[in-house]
Amino acid sequence: MSPIELNKRQEEILRIVKGNGPITGEQIAERLHLTRATLRPDLAILTMAGFLDARPRVGYFYSGKKPGHDVTDTMNNMKVKDFQSIPVVVRENVSVYDAISQMFLDDVGTLFVVDKNSMLTGVLSRKDLLRTSLGSQDLTAIPVHIIMTRMPNITYCSKADSLIQVANRLINQQIDALPVVEELANGLKVVGRITKTNITRAFLSLSESHEL
Ligand code: ADP
């Protein structure tokens, strides 16, 4: 069993839940003047490590138990939904020039391409766009669907997958990001983005909650 060292924010969350539980994530965030999204990784760690219990539609409450999970359990319980980022998508007919601008504007390394129904059709990486820029073609005249990696060759994941599964796919396929999707009757709806940065952040939060 690992001794657990909490960071300052996690200590504060525990104090709030002990005094006010059951309390929703939203209410905890309000008290700390933070957004719910910012707190999500901390709440996930506290729940996984056994400090807090969470009940749907009720909120978080202090479990009173001594945390008994080791690092492996904690890692297996780290889910995509708690660590994912907002996806940045472009339509298939957008030009390579505009896709490059979008990448800079949103400060991301991977864009997802969607059709008119917002269903996933492709992926654009930095090097896909760089490769095209090497030619002497007019980048405003090339639509991204010509150069993107397309379905069915896209590796993706769902919110319920574990970060370990995602890390495996990123390493095995030698890619930087996966779209998080919901499988609908008419295709895959893009609901998130998970990248090597999210995995690194999760790795850091592990070191904050376990004395490694
Ligand atoms: P870069 O090309 O900038 O190094 P990646 O390693 O992520 O970035 O991409 C390598 C190649 O794999 C690119 O051609 C890209 O289109 C493709 N790719 C990126 N992400 C995925 C994914 N989730 N599924 C399938 N192919 C992908």
Image: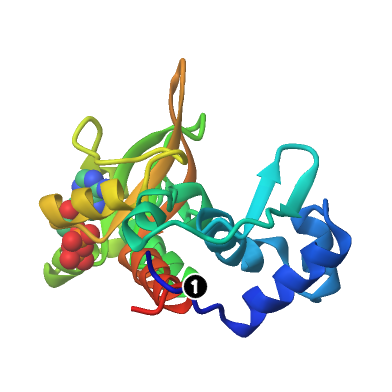
Q: Nearer the viewer, residue 116 or 32?
A: 32
Given the current orientation, which residue lies at the most extreme top position?
Answer: 185
Q: Nearer the viewer, residue 47 or 176?
A: 47
Query: What residue is rendered at 58% in x and 67% in y?
Result: 42
Q: Nearer the viewer, residue 170 or 190?
A: 170
Tag 1: amino acid: Leu
Query: What residue is rendered at 41% in x and 56% in y?
Result: 74
Q: How is the image coloured?
A: rainbow
Q: Is residue 77 above or below residue 139?
A: above
Figure quadrant, ligand 1? bottom left
Query: What residue is rendered at 51% in x and 29% in y?
Result: 117
Residue underneath mark 1 = 105
Instruction: Provide the secondary structure element on which disc 1 rests.
Output: helix
Q: Quadrant of the C terminus?
A: bottom left
Residue 47 on image: x %, y %: 58, 55
Q: Quadrant of the N terminus?
A: bottom left
Q: On the picture, is 3 further left or further right than 37?
A: left
Tally of numbered discs: 1
Q: Is residue 55 above or below residue 178?
A: above
The quadrant holding residue 12 is bottom right
Q: On the picture, is 116 further left or further right than 124?
A: right
Q: On the picture, is 149 further left or further right than 21?
A: left
Q: Nearer the viewer, residue 182 or 122?
A: 182
Q: Is residue 69 above or below residue 187?
A: below
Query: What residue is rendered at 65% in x and 66% in y?
Result: 39
